Amino acid sequence: MYPGREEVGQRSETVRRANLSAIVRELHLRGPLSRSELVARTGLTRSAIRALVGELVAGELVAEEAAVRLGTPGRPSPLVRLVPDGAVVLALEIAIDSLAVAVVGAGGVVHELERVDRPRGHLSLDEVVADLVELAALARSRRPAGEMPIRVAVAVAAIVSRADGLVRFAPNLGWVDVPLGARLAEALALPVPVEVDNESDLGALAEFRRGAARGADDVLYVHGEVGVGGGIIVDGRPLDGIGGYGGEIGHMPVNPDGRSCRCGSTGCWETEVGEGALLTRAGYALDGGREAIDQVLADAAAGRPAALAALDSVGRWLGIGLAGLVNILNPRRVVLGGLFSRIHPFVVDRMDLTLDHYALAAPRRLVSVVPSTLGVDAPLLGAAEMAFEPLLDDPAAWLGPRGALVQLESA
């Protein structure tokens, strides 16, 4: 066969899709940009940007606004922005003591967010799914009639098989081999895929894209509550491990003579830095929850010795664990989320001193350890980011023939 037209046509379509992806991803991550800025960031020509933006405008995914005067010669460059209602996703979160739902639009615009506290304990899958469906219905009822999310994503405090949405192990929820993704897909009854991932991995994604880790390509996110989890990003990409179970840093063995862990081992890092460790050392009930943590922090602010000593101990063990992780991963930034973000002002000095002592000097000089800027909602917002990924990868697959965004079965 004479090489030529079909092959060239396929290559042209591949290039077109890649270029659309580059534009949409820039707008999603950076916000509104002028056409000139899109030229500079994507490396595409002005004519290519004009044609591709026109296609996205026709598809109602982006809009162009009045030209921006940049103080340079030539005509002002129109401003391009994603339409926040042009594509929305449904994000869900199952934390130890709360459930949350958000409707998030393109560009990371949060349209609706509902979070409800719930008693701690081993709730059944049926109870959790029913509550999430009710929350999702409430959030969606406040949106325009007929609006359909392009995808659903779930953050859960568990070891998750991302391929099939199976929760392999969630010791603090009491779940083993629970088909969370399948059950939620059935109960929500939406004609879109449902994805499930670990809350710390998604918290890392959110902080990397929209929070305290923006601008850093090598990131460690450490999330603490009852348990401790981690999300790792290396060179801008998540480090998940072969089965998707990477980042379970809370179960690093750090103290052979320590406490028993819910995972079945002894001396895991979370037994020294988790919520239970802090409350026990401060003299509070192990299951006191967030209210007890609030009281510990109030006691510390008032200078009470038991609270200060408990926080000092947690800060020391936090520094010890982080030193090992900094030596192994050599991150640019460590983001402390959940409990660790709340206690950061009380433990930062002890943590830093311990980190200085145990970490190798070279990687220690390069890393900064900072509290989360997204707070408790980081995993939920990370779920939204995961749900948008297929659209960012291939916007062309989602543009309908009449210019409306559609969900393709193949997506």
Image: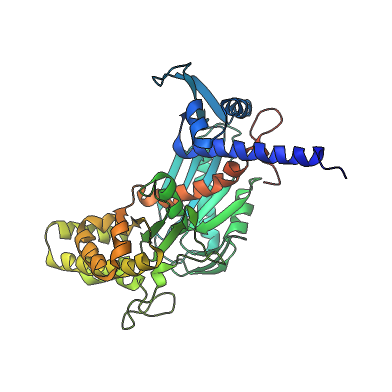
Residue 48 sits in quarter: top right
Residue at image position (35%, 61%) is 224
- Is residue 106 visible to us here? no
- Residue 237 position, x and y percent, is 50, 54
Q: Position of residue 50 (x, y in %)?
A: 59, 25
* Residue at the bottom extreme of this rendering: 257
Quadrant of the rendered image containing residue 312: bottom left
In this view, 4 is above or below 55 = below
360 or 399, nearer to the observer: 360
Q: Residue at left 53%, top 40%?
A: 25
Can residue 219 be seen by looking at this rendering? yes
Q: Residue at x 31, y 80 (%)?
A: 258
Left or right: where does residue 293 sit relative to residue 225? Answer: left
Q: Nearer the viewer, residue 372 or 129?
A: 372
**Residue 330 at what x, y percent from top left?**
38, 62
Q: Residue at left 54%, top 54%?
A: 130
In this rendering, the count of numbered labels is 0
Residue 169: image x %, image y %?
A: 51, 69
